[in-house]
């Protein structure tokens, strides 16, 4: 009698284990085995257009949690005065890239890269990807201890089009932008653009002027 009961319990246990194993075959298990970046925020071109035309892309991400951006001019392009940090890490500990190309730490007068305001016209940026915490190993940077900020240029339009904008403000500020997209040319697309900025310096005598193409 006891042997029959024990055999019945053993058979039931085996049946339950088999059912559990069968159900587990359909379950999805995700393992972070390569140090994936956990917190990533992406600002699209739609969000970038909400800022004043010609503004640095940093102006679009400065309201994100953990991001602190300071600049002496309203556009945020006067690189001598710009400062950015992520969760307390200053820009010397951050990695910056444009279309995968390293920009160094973007400090004023640096010799290991180029500031984003010089590398590309602000209107031609497609999106900005902010990764807080230790940067991904795949990021082309030697200073991404505290995070990475990756810029991506916009794709030329599929149709022939012309776009532009003009900004005017105090301190005799005037800024203009014009772009021409060729559209699809046998599978190839191209874009030509030009931007001009002229404004008095925020402090002292002189002007802040730039030409970009």
Image (spheres, grey):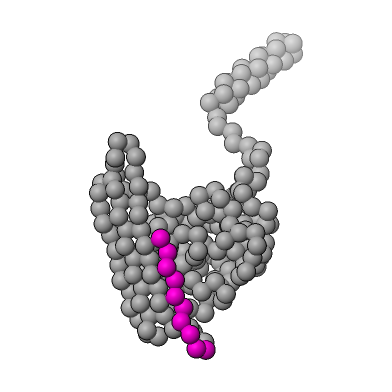
Q: Residue at x 63, y 37 (%)?
A: 31
Against 203, is 4 above or below? Answer: above
Specify the quadrant that holds the C terminus: bottom left
Q: Residue at x 38, y 70 (%)?
A: 196
Q: Quadrant of residue 7?
A: top right
Against 54, is 190 above or below? Answer: above
- Asked if residue 210 is among those painted magenta in the image, a careful observer would answer yes
Q: Nearer the viewer, residue 146 or 152?
A: 152
- Asked if residue 125 is among those painted magenta in the image, a careful observer would answer no
Residue 44 seen in render: no
Magenta residues, start to end = 204-213
Q: Residue at x 66, y 40 (%)?
A: 34
Image x and y of residue 42, in percent? 48, 54
Q: Nearer the viewer, residue 86 or 113?
A: 113
Is residue 25 rendered to the left or right of residue 10? left
Q: Count of labels shown?
A: 0
Specify the quadrant that holds the N terminus: top right
Q: Residue at x 59, y 33 (%)?
A: 29
Image x and y of residue 74, in percent? 45, 77
Find the residue positioned furthest to the bottom. 204
Image x and y of residue 177, in percent? 34, 65
Residue 3 seen in render: yes
Image x and y of residue 140, in percent? 61, 49
Is residue 52 rendered to the left or right of residue 81? left
Find the residue positioned furthest to the right. 2
The main secondary structure of the magenta stretch is strand
Q: Nearer the viewer, residue 26 or 203?
A: 203
Against 113, is 11 above or below? Answer: above
């Amino acid at each position: 009698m006891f042997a029959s009961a024990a055999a019945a319990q053993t058979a039931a246990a085996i049946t339950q284990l088999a059912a559990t194993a069968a159900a587990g075959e359909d379950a999805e298990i995700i393992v972070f085995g390569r140090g994936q970046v956990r917190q990533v925020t992406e600002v699209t071109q739609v969000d970038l257009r909400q800022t004043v035309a010609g503004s640095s892309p940093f102006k679009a991400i400065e309201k994100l949690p953990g991001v602190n951006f300071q600049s002496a001019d309203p556009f945020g392009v006067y690189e001598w005065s710009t400062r950015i940090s992520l969760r307390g890490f200053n820009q010397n500990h951050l990695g910056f890239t444009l279309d995968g190309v390293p920009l160094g730490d973007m400090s004023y007068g640096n010799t290991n890269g180029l500031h984003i305001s010089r590398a590309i016209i602000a209107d031609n940026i497609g999106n900005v990807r902010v990764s807080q915490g230790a940067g991904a190993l795949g990021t082309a940077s030697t200073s991404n201890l505290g995070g990475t900020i990756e810029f991506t240029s916009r794709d030329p339009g599929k149709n022939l089009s012309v776009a532009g904008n003009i900004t005017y403000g105090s301190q005799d500020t005037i800024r203009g932008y014009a772009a021409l997209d060729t559209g699809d040319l046998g599978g190839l697309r191209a874009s030509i653009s030009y931007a001009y900025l002229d404004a008095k310096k925020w402090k002292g005598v002189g002007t802040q002027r730039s030409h970009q193409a």
